[in-house]
Amino acid sequence: MLACGFAALAASYLGSVALRAHLDDPAPTPIVYDRNGTFLAQFGTVRDGRTEYGFWHADAPPERVVRATLALEDRRFWSHPGVDPRAVLRAVWQRVRGGSHRSGASTIAMQVARMQHPAPRTMWAKAVEAGTALALTARYGRAAVLAQYFRLVPYGNGSHGIAHAARWYFGKPAADLSWAEAALLAAVPQAPATHNPLRPAGLQRARARADFLLDALRREGTLSGPERDAAWTQLAALRPAPAPQRPPGAMHAILRLQALAPSVPDPSDARIVAAIDLGWQRRIAALLRKDVAGWRERGARQAAALVVRRDTHEVLASVGSVGWRDTPGGRIDFTRALRSPGSTLKPFIYADALRRGLLRPAELLDDSASVIATIANADSAYLGRLPARQALGNSRNVPAADLLRRIGVGRAFDLFADLGLHDRDGAAVDFGLSMAIGGLPTRMDLLVRAYDALADDGVMSDLVWYRGQPASPPVRVVSAASARQVALYLSDPLARLPSFGRYGSTEYPFTVAVKTGTSQGYRDAWTVAWSADFVVAAWVGRPDGAPMAGLGGANSAAGIVREIMLRLHATRPGELAEAGFAAPDDTAPAPVCAGPDATPAAGTCNRTLLEYLPRRSQAAVPTPAEPTIRLSIAAPAADSHIWRNPESPPAANRLILTALAVPHVRQVVWYVDDAPFALADPDEHVAWQLTPGEHRFQIGLPLRPERSRAVRVVVE
């Protein structure tokens, strides 16, 4: 029985050692600085209720640090197998004698075993540590065990490992530590709380131990007399810098960086240099706070802003709210919150319609109440026929929704997904034409990346948050010609007339493309703009989604964006404008008739806009002598999914068909599944009996080849 008991004990012991006989590899925790080297934060890991930092790789610990540490912790490290028999015998003899002075017997390898698997200080735990130390040394070698020690050893204040401690306390690599600095750090691990160098009493105790260490190094010949004296002098004056604090106003940006922290560029020096400029971060945070305070009586409670450099796609500032702790919803990062984007998606609709040939640069779009029955303009007014430049510049809802209908609801939904504005959650028919006016929620950071693509000739790149960040290859999402055309539309102050007045919040003394947006009921106010150097976005609203009192993109967020942009360019109103954005290749400027009611009469036009048209076709707007008849289907919407009501009589299960012909014609032919169905005035509603299956609707002109785009409908 006794033999069985010993066998079981031995098996348990060997099993415990075997489970621990490997070198753990904890992930390094980064220290984050802004682009100018100012401290932002450090990210730790929580273990046993404590936050720990460090664990940076240290494959080749500096010679000074090694010598200083071994002189205190394990002088015979290079000769024993992981356990020092002499130290063990000395410790046992001191315990038997019962004297007041007792020395420890833990070697570097035993400390590594304990740091990797902390356990209560019992005889069994000490025995397992000793066995593990022998196994680790035999398996990996002394150099690897020593490197692991210098990665795990605690230096106080949550810091682990010499690489992190050297950077945290002295702001330098471990290889650059002086003898005094190395001695001071070597004095800490024996009792990190007692020898805390950031507290006066702890610093005094750590210096006393470091003094003893320098003497020991002198006695063993590592230091000469003059070297020891110089180290003593420096040690007496040595005071590690106070622990830096996270700056206010950057908490959301810090949390964003923390989400990216697993991608540490260099595990041996896990500093992250963020793209954020803390100076701009603070200035923009102060600006948002001031403006929201001024709009408080009108219901505004929060604001956010994002600034990106165009050439590098780096995020210079990301302010997620106007106050982390002291404002309603302040802990919500509104650069990442899903909100209605209002009209800010319209430029992508125009760009895609231009790319697909569904919109010509000089084409007149109809801003009339009869175009789409379910969409109205925000101001409840209609401007009639407008060139595309003016329709987008005035942010008219009806022409944008009509263009989306030309593209097709499904294709537009996929377009916005390709732009990264949503994750394809839901179906296109759930949003329909409302996508043109804010019905598809998105986030500011995603919106800015998509606008950055518009500014970059249609090529989308990842936003860069820190140096060395892994990035996806750039991808083309919009053609260069259509991206440039949209940039010209949005940077033309004249194209914003009459909806937006001159010299207001959307006009600049240099070339800037600007798009405002306001969601239903003034719940979200947006502006996104880009210049030759920057993309800037701002949002104003409420965390509870309640309406504001008449605060829209043009009279709130646009002012924020303008002030940020002017400060970024160090420009004041009244300075000369720079050259405009590049025009599409193989185009030349030509005048087009501007609205309201842009149709030229008898070759005359009250006002023109300059448009860039293909050189091979410089004709601007067709005259009444040669009319172009545009046919489209107003209802049903493309890609509609319709369910019949089985409880209704068959005659009640009907679909109302609505046509649109510009200019008006007397009759159109309705085609269902490519077969003629009805001949009617385009203003006349036509009823079609619901029939299960997939169907294709078109309209055409009698005895002429013109036909509208086909509309697909599924009936169940």
Image (cartoon, helix red, strand yellow):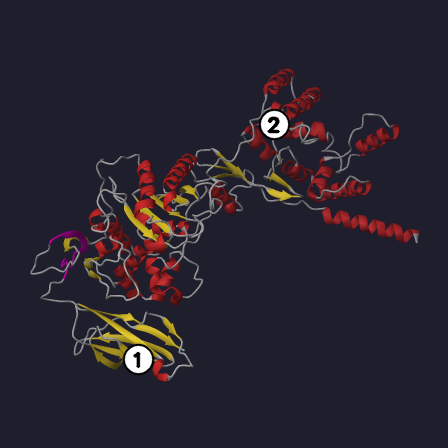
The answer for how far apart the CA atoms under marks 1 and 2 are is 82 Å
Residue 116 as seen in the image, left or right of residue 629: right
Q: Nearer the viewer, mark 1 or mark 2?
A: 1
Quarter of the image holding residue 504? top left
Report helix, strand or loop for mark 1: strand
Q: Is residue 196 above or below residue 553?
A: above
Q: Which mark is residue 54?
A: none
Quarter of the image holding residue 353? bottom left
Specify whether residue 613 is painted magenta.
yes
Residue 90 as seen in the image, left or right of residue 304: right
In percent of width and height, residue 37 lies at 46, 33
Whether residue 307 appears in this view of the structure is: no
| Residue drawn at 29 percent across, 71 percent down | 635
**Tag count in the figure?**
2
- Mark 1 crowdedness (10 Å alpha carbons): few <14, some 14-19, many ≥20: some
- Segment tinted magenta in the rendering: 606-621
In percent of width and height, residue 614 lies at 18, 57
Report the residue marked by disc 2.
198
